[in-house]
Image (tube, rainbow, N blue to C red):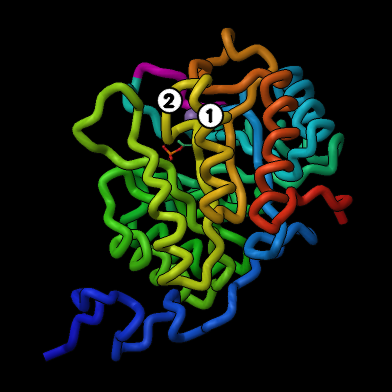
Amino acid sequence: MESNSFNDPSLFGECSVPVKVGRKSKPGPTVVDVKGIKFGSAEVVIIAGPCSVENREQMMETAKAVKSAGGVILRGGAFKPRSSPYNFQGLGEEGLKLLQETRIETGLPIVTEVMDTRMVDLVAGYADIMQVGSRNMQNYPLLKEVGMLRKPVLLKRGMMSTIEEFLLAAEYILNQGNEQVILCERGIRTFETSTRNTLDLSAVPMLKHLSHLPVIVDPSHGTGHRWMVPPMAKAAVAAGADGLIMEVHYKPQEALCDGHQSLSTDEFTLLMTDLKKIAQAVGRDIYTHEIK
Ligand code: PEP
Ligand code: MN
């Protein structure tokens, strides 16, 4: 019978079957390089931007503020996984084009979500990092498709997924030959209703203990409350996260999606100052190098 190493209580520590995401297969950290910006190094990488791409002004104004505050990668969804089919679904390819324009204007690399295997080539033509969202973490055909690319993948933890399932999802990508995977803790569903999700910060040291892949945290979807983003962002950096992805909007009150959990550009700027102090207190720094 095939042995299932994942049932071993020590998970990847003592497993007999080679697991590509596990520390046993690679003791040193995997560094994912996005145009010279390194995830998994001593420096913490800050990704910020709106939940979804809405229009040119929104993207340009938000991206410029993100950049001047020290954010180095821009987020923005063109294809949005919305719970209701009647809500804004994203601008699709037009959104990808706006992301590209914003990258040309600001120099910030782009992370955007791919929801469907049929869209992988299209999205890969625009994105610097391919995001696989929480709802698609166990979409195995999609994981295999992005695994065939030679482009970084941001894999978000399924909202109902264990650490084991999360790492096995990443394993699908590595199995296709793509080792440039960034893991993202974005909160899980629990009995708690005061927050949108329960941000599992214990996943950060656990994932780093088990795997060589870089780990980032999304305190925006992880809490669902704008005012909770700064404290949880700071806690994530203190817990050893290699980066953060946060929703920032130049007019959060007018956002078409997730405005309630989006920081204003002023709030983001203030937070960046605090994050620097936290990073330095734990022997790291915030990545601020010039974009290559
Ligand atoms: C997002 O980052 O835009 C998003 C939809 O997040 P998640 O997949 O974590 O819900
Ligand atoms: Mn969102």
Q: Main secondary structure of the magenta part?
A: loop
Q: Is residue 175 visible?
A: no
Residue under the point 57% across and 8% down? 253
Please, what is the three-letter code of the amino acid marked with disc 2?
A: Gly
Residue under the point 49% across and 16% down? 260
Which one is nearer the viewer's eye here, 292 or 164?
Answer: 164
Residue 226 rendering spot, x and y as whole percentages: 52, 21
Residue 84 rendering spot, x and y as whole percentages: 32, 22
Which one is nearer the viewer's eye here, 160 or 11?
Answer: 11
Please tell me whether mark 2 or mark 1 is closer to you in this view: 1
Q: For residue 90: magenta?
A: yes
Highlighted range, magenta? 86-91
Residue 68 rendering spot, x and y as whole percentages: 84, 31
Taking the image as shown, residue 150 lies to the left or right of residue 231, namely right
Q: State the mark number for residue 229.
A: 1
- Placement of 76 over or under 33, stated as above or below: above
Q: Is residue 22 visible?
A: yes
* Mark closer to the chain start, 2 or 1: 2
Which residue ends up furthest to the front in the rendered image? 281
Taking the image as shown, residue 14 lies to the left or right of residue 66, namely left
